[in-house]
Amino acid sequence: QAQLVESGGGLVKPGGSLRLSCEASGFTFSDYYMNWIRQAPGKGLEWVSYITNTGSTIYYADSVKGRFTISRDNAKNSVYLQMNNLRAEETAVYYCASGIYGSGRSDYWGQGTLVTVSS
Amino acid sequence: SYVLTQPPSVSLAPGQTARISCWGTNIGSKSVYWYQQKPGQAPVLVIYDDSGRPSGIPERFSGSNSGNTATLTISRVEAGDEADYYCQVWDYTSNHVIFGGGTRLAVL
C-alpha cells in the first residue's frame, strides 16, 4: 500500500538550515503532486509548499517564501524541503502528503518528522 | 488571503449526530476536503470534493457545501470518532492550500 516516510528532522539553532526528505513507495510517485504541511505543537495544520508531479510548478506559503525550497527526484521517488534561516516559531512536525486529483487534496500522508528550532 | 473558520470544539454524547462547520467566503464555489487527525497520528482524508467518501471511510461520515458554509456530518458518533477535524480548500487566487483552524470533537 502507499507509504510516505519523512526523515531529516532534528534540532537546529535559529538561523540554521535543515533538509527534509520524504520517500514514497506503493504508488506511482511521478503521477502525484506533493505537499509539505507542518503542525506546531498543540496547533493546527499549516500548508508550507506544493510541487507538481513533474516539478514544473511550485508554490510556497508566504511565511516561508524565499527561505524554503521544495524539490523532487522522481527517479528516487523522493521529495525534499530545504529550509534555511529557520525561526523558533517554525518548530513543528513536518508532514509530506501526496495527491493526484487536484485542489491540494492529500490522499496519502507520512507520519511526520519533528523539527525543533532552538538555541 | 482566503480564510477558513471552524468552531474550536464540538462535544456530544455517543449516538448523536455531529455537525462541524467550515466558514469561508463563497466556499460553495470551491471543492472542500475534510481530514481527521487522532492524537499522535497523521491526518486522514475522510471527505473529498465536498461530499465524496474515500474507500474505507464509514458511511456515517458525510459532507455538504453551499454558500459560505461547508459541513462535515458524523452520524451516530462513537468514542473512536474523537479527533481533530480540519477542512481544506485550494485558493486559486493565491495558489495556496488553505486549512481551517481545526475542530476538536469530544464524545462524552
Image: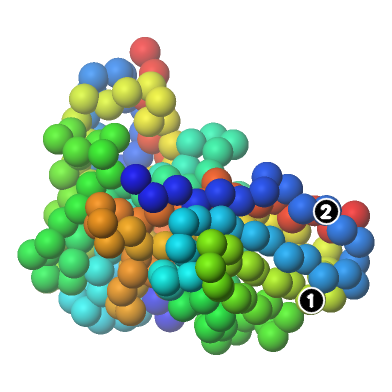
**Drawn side of residue B65 relative to residue A112, left or right:** right
Query: Looking at the rendering, which quadrant does residue A41 occupy?
Result: top right
Residue at left offset 84%, top offset 75%: B76
On-image quarter of the N terminus of chain B: top left
Q: Which chain's residue wears label 1?
A: B
Where in the figure is residue B57, as x and y percent of width and height? 62, 80
**Drawn side of residue A115 relative to residue B74, left or right:** left
- Sequence-earlier tag: 1 or 2: 2
Query: Looking at the rendering, which quadrant does residue A42 occupy?
Result: top right
Q: Which mark is residue B6?
A: none
Q: Which mark is residue B11?
A: 2
Q: Is residue A3 above or below residue B1?
A: below
Q: Are marks 1 and 2 in contact (CB under 8 Å)?
A: no
Residue at left offset 90%, top offset 55%: B108
Q: Which chain's residue wears label 2?
A: B
How many other residues sit within 10 Å of disc 2, few (<14), some (14-19) or many (≥20)? few
Residue at the outermost top position: A119
Element at label 2: strand
Where in the figure is residue B5, as x and y percent of width and height? 56, 49
Closer to the camera in the image, B91 or A61? B91
How many other residues sit within 10 Å of disc 1, few (<14), some (14-19) or many (≥20)? some
Where in the figure is residue A55, as x and y percent of width and height? 11, 64
Closer to the camera in the image, B77 or A28? B77
Residue at left offset 73%, top offset 65%: B19
- Mark 1 vs mark 2: same chain? yes
Mark 2 residue type: Ser
Mark 1 residue type: Ser
Q: Is residue B53 visible?
A: yes
Q: Is residue B33 above or below residue A93?
A: below
Where in the figure is residue A40, as x and y percent of width and height? 48, 36
Residue at the spot of label 1: B75
